[in-house]
């Protein structure tokens, strides 16, 4: 490199002033264009990565929403099943709902396997959080047939609140949805979190 610069200086010294100015302006123009290209390329790649993470977050939302809905329905069926007049029919429906919940959890697992790499370290943290929620749901499904009505509602509602409030927020943070610089989609992500937390977690009604 030093040898090249020495040759360049020697040739530049022997050039007429007009030619020197032309060469130097060409060099400066090249440097400016190169730096501008690098900056644009970096911004483009950053935007693509940002969008990929947002897409991953949306993919997580789909099975989580289904899981929350089925958990809410399972809450209602568990309470209704305590009545002897409808117990047989309700127990069968509750079993079907339990199978749907298990399928939802498998979908969350599949989504995590597919998109955790896109989210990087945040994806690893999300996986640990999901493992905790999954265990809580499995424990609830195991205990539900033997729970009193008040305890059943309490445990269902606690999981629903945490799942659709805290966990949905974790997904939004990990996937950049809550950091979206575009105002409409930023509020869309925020509204989903608020709606999910209110509708699935905080309502006390037992929907069958």
Image: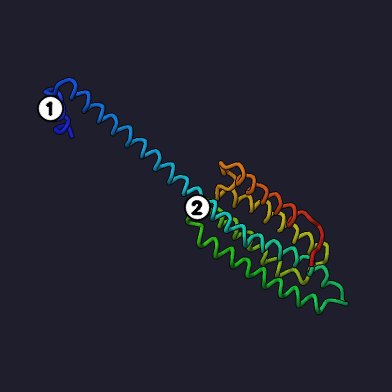
Residue 35 appears in which quarter of the rendering? top left
160 to the left or right of 24: right
Mark 1 crowdedness (10 Å alpha carbons): few <14, some 14-19, many ≥20:
few
Q: Locate the N terminus and report the quarter of the image it occupies.
A: top left
In the image, residue 141 sits, relative to residue 166, either above or below, namely: below
Work out how far the residue at label 2 is from the one at label 1, CA to CA, in angstroms.
50 Å
Q: Residue at x 59, y 63 (%)?
A: 108
131 to the left or right of 48: right
143 to the left or right of 104: right
Residue 52, which numbered label? Answer: 2
Residue 195: x and y in percent read 71, 52
Residue 82 appears in which quarter of the rendering? bottom right
Camera-side mark, 2 or 1:
1
Q: Residue at x 55, y 47 (%)?
A: 176
Label 1: which residue?
11
Residue 106, which numbered label? Answer: none
Q: Looking at the image, which is closer to me, 147 or 86? A: 86
Residue 31: x and y in percent read 30, 33
* Secondary structure beneath label 1: helix
206 to the left or right of 57: right
Q: Residue at x 36, y 39 (%)?
A: 37
């Amino acid at each position: 490199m030093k040898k090249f610069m020495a040759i360049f200086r020697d040739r530049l010294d022997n050039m007429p002033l007009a030619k020197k100015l032309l060469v130097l302006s060409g060099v400066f123009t090249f440097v400016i264009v190169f730096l501008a290209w690098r900056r644009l390329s970096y911004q483009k790649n950053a935007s693509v990565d940002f969008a990929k993470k947002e897409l991953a977050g949306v993919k997580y939302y789909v099975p989580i929403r289904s899981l929350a809905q089925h958990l809410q329905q399972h809450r209602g069926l568990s309470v209704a099943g305590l009545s002897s007049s409808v117990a047989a029919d309700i127990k069968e429906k509750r079993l079907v709902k339990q199978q749907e919940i298990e399928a939802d959890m498998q979908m969350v697992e599949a989504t995590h396997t597919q998109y955790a790499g896109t989210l990087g370290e945040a994806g690893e943290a999300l996986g640990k959080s999901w493992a905790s929620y999954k265990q809580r749901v499995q424990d609830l499904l195991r205990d539900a047939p033997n729970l009193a009505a008040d305890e059943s509602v309490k445990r269902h509602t606690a999981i629903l609140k945490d799942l659709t409030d805290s966990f949905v927020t974790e997904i939004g943070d990990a996937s950049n949805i809550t950091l979206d610089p575009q105002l409409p989609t930023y509020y869309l992500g925020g509204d989903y979190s608020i709606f999910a937390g209110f509708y699935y977690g905080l309502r006390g009604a037992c929907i069958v």
